Image (cartoon, rainbow, N blue to C red):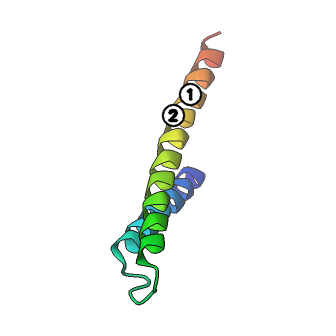
Amino acid sequence: MLLKIVNYCIKILIVLLGVLLASGVLFPSYPDKLLIRAMGVLFIFWGVYRIIVYTMNLKKYRRDENEEESR
């Protein structure tokens, strides 16, 4: 259970880092704002993708575990 919580927390932190980068809060005086915003959007998409994949794999693992128990 603790491992699941840690996994979700790290993935949510990646999304939050992306939001901070995309909004310009972390590096307000960086000369290339387009690069920082692009990296922020990339972090957001990557974090959301990882959350979705982890959730799907967790459901698949539970389903396979239930099938093993019913045999």
Q: Quadrant of the C terminus?
A: top right
Q: Answer left or right for 67 relative to 37.
A: right
Residue placed furthest toward the top: 71
Q: Residues within 10 Å of mark 1 (few under 14, many from 20)?
A: few
Q: Position of residue 20 (x, y in %)?
A: 39, 73
Q: Secondary structure at mark 1?
A: helix
Does 71 sit left or right of 49 as displayed?
right
| Crowd around label 2: few <14 · some 14–19 · many ≥20 (10 Å) | few
Vertical placement of residue 66 versus 23, above or below? above
Name the residue rendered at 46%, 73% in the picture. Answer: 36
Q: Is residue 3 above or below residue 67?
A: below
In percent of the image, x 37 and y 78: which residue is there?
A: 24
Label drawn at residue 56: 2
In the image, 7 versus 24, the foreground residue is: 24
Query: Could you say where residue 25 lies in the image, as x and y percent from the top left?
Result: 36, 81
**Residues under labels 1 and 2: Cα distance?**
6 Å
